[in-house]
């Protein structure tokens, strides 16, 4: 589990991703940083891939950009206040102040039995 969180292995996985095929899916077998800033990655199918310092720097900057975007998303999600949707309370019955209510029913509204 700790190997998957290794920043160098994550960089190697990012660099080797465009070169993966159906038989070489998965994490790289090995990776090594070069003194000039490049990187050598052994893909899952055993191919050795050499990357220039410019390619490594571009992949590193894209990973950092993704990390910044994720942090922005998480901080925005933490700032959101959860909203609980509640139905409005029922309308209070109207008070008649002690006066009896009178209902008027017209003749055409009565049911004949």
Image (cartoon, helix red, strand yellow):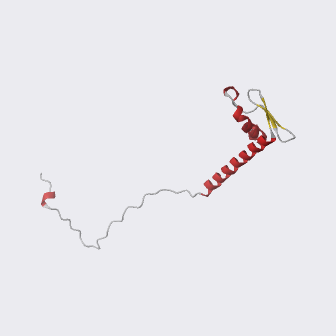
- Where 66 falls versus 25 (above or below)? below
- In the image, taking residue 101 as reference, residue 72 lies left or right, namely right
The residue located at (20%, 65%) in the rendering is 103
Question: Depth check: 18 or 89 in front?
Answer: 18
Look at the image and tell me in which quarter the N terminus lies: top right
- Where 12 falls versus 87 (above or below)? above
Q: Position of residue 48 (x, y in %)?
A: 79, 29
> Residue 44 appears in which quarter of the rendering?
top right
- In the image, taking residue 37 as reference, residue 62 lies left or right, namely left
- In the image, taking residue 60 as reference, residue 35 lies left or right, namely right
Residue 2 visible, this angle: no
Q: Residue furthest right?
A: 35
The residue located at (46%, 57%) in the rendering is 86
Q: Position of residue 109 (x, y in %)?
A: 16, 58
The residue located at (76%, 37%) in the rendering is 12
Number of dots carrying numbers: 0
> Residue 105 appears in which quarter of the rendering?
bottom left
The residue located at (85%, 38%) in the rendering is 34
Residue 66 visible, this angle: yes
């Amino acid at each position: 589990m700790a190997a998957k969180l290794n920043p160098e292995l994550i960089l190697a996985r990012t660099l080797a991703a465009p070169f993966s095929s159906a038989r070489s899916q998965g994490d790289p077998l090995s990776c090594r940083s070069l003194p000039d800033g490049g990187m050598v990655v052994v893909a899952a199918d055993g191919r050795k891939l050499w990357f220039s310092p410019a390619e490594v720097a571009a992949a590193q900057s894209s990973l950092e950009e993704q990390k910044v975007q994720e942090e922005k998303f998480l901080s925005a999600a933490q700032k959101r206040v959860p909203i609980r949707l509640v139905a409005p309370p029922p309308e209070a019955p109207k008070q008649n102040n002690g006066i009896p209510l009178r209902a008027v029913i017209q003749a055409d509204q009565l049911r004949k039995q």
